[in-house]
Amino acid sequence: MNNGYNTGSLQVTVLFFATLKDRAGTSRLTVEMPADSHVDELQTWLTERFPSARDFFPSCLVAVNHEYADRQTLLKDGDQVAFFPPVSGGIGSGTQFPEYFSVTTESLDLNLILEKITLPTTGAACIFSGMVRGQTRRGKVFETDYLEYEAYPEMAESKLRQVAREMRERWPEVEGIAIVQRIGVLQPGTPTVLVACSAGHRDSGVFDAAFYGIDRLKQIVPIWKKEVGPAGEIWVEGEYYPQAGE
């Protein structure tokens, strides 16, 4: 990109996900910008470059180097800038208790995951698992042949750890936490996500923590799903807009 500036330039890597990826016809590109450019200037250029995605840019989310950002964020040379719609929904983070986070294409093994967060002191565990529905009621019944899950993996695993930190702040008696998201093409009846909490007793907050964990995952973790069925296909997008730094 050359706008006639003589004050130097910077290069950023731009990533597109979900609807924006489909409309732009690409998932990644390198863009040269004038020095001291902000996200909004990059977005303006992208809107001109990809007119088929023009209607989606104003409402999309932006992340710079795996953290949510606003349009006034100043860009630096080498930044990775991701644009995506609101989201549909390793081990260890310095805590003494076990944690397990993964974004994977592999099937979810409940027993194996539970084993990773079980301690000698564990006397209770609460597990939430989401599954692919074969039918969805939105006024009338929509049939689903399969769901296709996509993620921004590097940022997703970082945000899974953030969700766990928030859970611990609210329910300090929780011991182990596991949050696992499966991606790829998944058939009806297939488990897609798992949030599990372990603790010494059932009254330690494990139920509330697991409930919070899945809700928060669907707010801030960059994962999307495409619903495919006889009526066609559609990216299912959320309505929550995280703030910069959230």
Image (cartoon, grey):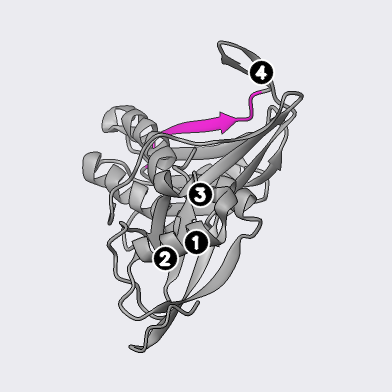
Image position, residue 202 (x, y; %): 34, 28
Horizontal side of 210 relative to 53 (left or right) equals left
Instruction: For marks 2 and 4, give the CA distance.
Output: 38 Å
Circle 3 SS class: loop
Kind of residue at badge 3: Arg
Q: Name the residue that disc number 4 marks.
A: 142
Q: Is residue 240 above or below residue 64?
A: above
| Residue 130 lies in the magenta stretch | yes
Image position, residue 75 (x, y; %): 34, 72
Q: Which badge, 2 or 3, is on the more N-terminal residue? A: 2
Disc marking residue 42: 2
Kind of residue at badge 4: Phe
Q: Which badge, 3 or 1, is on the more N-terminal residue? A: 1
| Residue 34 lies in the magenta stretch | no
Horizontal side of 171 relative to 14 (left or right) equals left
The residue mark sitting in front, 4 or 1, is 1
Q: Which residues are magenta?
A: 122-133
Kind of residue at badge 1: Leu
Q: Name the residue that disc number 3 marks.
A: 54
Q: Which badge, 4 or 1, is on the more N-terminal residue? A: 1
Q: Name the residue that disc number 1 marks.
A: 46
Labelled pair 4, 1 in contact (Cβ < 8 Å): no
Horizontal side of 101 relative to 163 (left or right) equals right
Q: Is residue 177 at all visible to an observer of this figure?
A: no
Instruction: For marks 2 and 3, give the CA distance.
Output: 13 Å
